[in-house]
Amino acid sequence: MFMHKKIAGGLLAAALVAACATPDHTAGVTPTRGPNLGATPSPAMLAAMDISIPPSGAGLPAGSGSVAQGQKVYDAKCQICHGPKGVGKPADPLVGGMGSLASGKPMRTVGSYWPYATTLFDYVRRAMPSNAPQSLSNEEAYAASAYVLFLNGIIREDQVMTAQTLPQVKMPNRDGFIDYSRK
Amino acid sequence: MSKVEPSPQVAATAETPATTPADNTRRRFLTRSASVAGTLAAGGVAANAAAQEVPAWMKTPGAPMRAYGTPSKYEAPVQRPFASGYASVSPGTGSSRTPHQSLEGTITPNGLHFERHHNGVPDIDPAKHELLIHGMVNRPLVFNLATLSRYPMVSRVHFVECSGNSGANSGPKPVQGTAGTIHGLASVSEWTGVPLSLLLNEAGVAAGAQWILAEGADSAGMSRSVPLTKIMDDAMVALYQNGERVRPEQGYPMRLLLPGWEGNMNVKWLRRIKVTDGPTHTKDETSKYTDLQPDGKARQFTFELGVKSIITFPSFGHKLDRSGLYEISGIAWSGAGRIAKVEVSADGGASWREAPLQGPIFSKSFTRFRLPWEWNGTAATLQSRATDEKGNVQPTRNAFISQYTPGMNYHNHYIQTWRIASDGSISNVYA
């Protein structure tokens, strides 16, 4: 019954059984009606949970941070993983790699690769430092962001990051991405 | 047969905890079942002295029932290899990998589903966890596990695959690792949960909305942007995994499931969906999981995972101890839909033979293929090549990597090659 026909390399044809013309039960159906049990969130809950910051800067909090303040925050809380002045190790380098992306040895850092400065604030505030996430004040998050931008030569030492200034920072690789979401 | 070592530590990088040179230095001879390795002789002579006696386990009452079962103790070596990048600061940052070389079928046991965490597994009290839906909606809503559990549910068998899976093969030299070490950041479960479209329809999506932001309740606050079309198509808030509540490392008490799209977007510990007019450009969709081309431009939002297959037996770590009939076995999957065809080559791609597929064939899930193979004891080069129902064909390694900067280690789905030496040992090679 099992007739093995040899081809190059010794692969054998398996005994095939003709497939039955059965209906496809693997897709299932998707329900369209629910019991409407969603509750209304309080304004306080919305304010506390809505921490994501898009490139427009919408939702950035009040406060400000300078490069000098940021250096203090960085040295105390970030350097242990990202190295002095953002050189990296054990965590990702934050600084350097400018012009390296097409070199065949790309170095992707905040300065060389990240398209938006808002992403830096968003991520620092929500996830850094990784041994104490969400422990930074808004001022500290602005300041740490300012320091990393300064180390990359993107802002001057006397610039201050706020809800107004941060979204206006033009990152060097702003136009370095091709949107595949519709391809 | 040498013993299998549990949990080989694998080298990690910050982003895609890469694979492991560890396998290079520790040649192990795995079989598909650890118990087989330990107890069975490979030879054809069945009878032995012990067989003449009544086995001990027939002469004494067996163990009692257990409230929650575990695998046989003889299978203890079947484990996930894992790596932690920042053990001193964040021991839970890293990944563990499904040991495909030791598994069969298509469903991944819950305890062997791969993990990729960006700051460990949170210990979430389900009574205190809420899911907020807000942003561009007519009325923001909050759900909890109790209310969500009242909703109509769907069950779907789908893979989840990290976009860094198989990244080990992006290096200049092939890493000598098992199928799980190289390709183990992909697993399949039957996921059960509430279609996210139901919840968004209840909230009422406002005109102009195009995307959502999904956010997790872990200490990385993992967040990703997803086009609204995908959310309304087949996204699910998954509450169950293979019939039981989603495991903590898979997002307990609830995770986002985006069938066929890169693992990182399937946000675990889901706590918030914000409906937006555009992408938020979070850290993990800009600085990570973007595909850099040789010209310095990067492809962003490459969500759908490519058609892919790997041979799981025989593969690195197994050893063929004699010539004769073997069954080649592997898994194939595609983010675009069902697998339509898998071909197998034993001569490095010079000739191909179509392998029968094990049904049922689910969309965006593993499909098992098997093919008998007569090994004549000489060197052979095994490959598999999958085609999905949309006509996408798994590319060769050279065709894939030429699109990207050297070492680009995301979304790799090219053909895997295993070289069988004449002594039956197996290595990972590039072809």
Image (cartoon, helix red, strand yellow):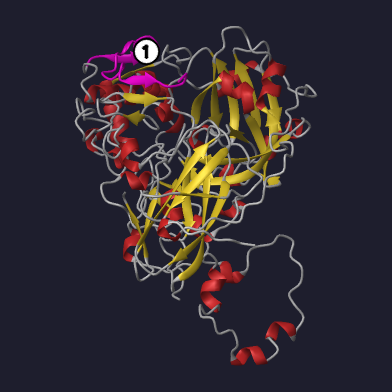
Give left or right: position of A160 versus A100.
right
Residue A4 against residue B49 in the figure, above or below: above
Report the predominant secondary structure element of the magenta stretch: loop
**Bounds of the magenta segment:** A158-183
Question: Percent x, y for residue B123?
Answer: 59, 44
Give left or right: position of A103 versus B319.
left
Q: Identify the residue under disc 1.
A: A167
Question: Percent x, y for residue A77?
Answer: 34, 36
Q: In the structure shown, which secondary structural element does the residue marked by tag 1 occupy?
A: helix
Residue A58 against residue A180 in the figure, above or below: above
- Taking depth in this image into account, of B265 and A70 the one nearest to the observer is B265
Label 1 packing within 10 angstroms: few (<14), some (14-19), many (20+): many
Q: Is residue B120 in view from this perspective?
A: no
Give left or right: position of A96 versus B275.
left
- The quadrant of the picture occupied by the N terminus of chain B is bottom left
Amino acid type at circle 1 is: Pro
- The residue under the point 53% across, 30% down is B390
Q: Is residue B52 in view from this perspective?
A: yes
Q: Is residue B184 magenta?
A: no
- Taking depth in this image into account, of A129 and B282 the one nearest to the observer is B282
Q: What subunit carries mark 1?
A: A
Question: Percent x, y for residue B201?
Answer: 70, 17
Residue A125 against residue B192 in the figure, above or below: above
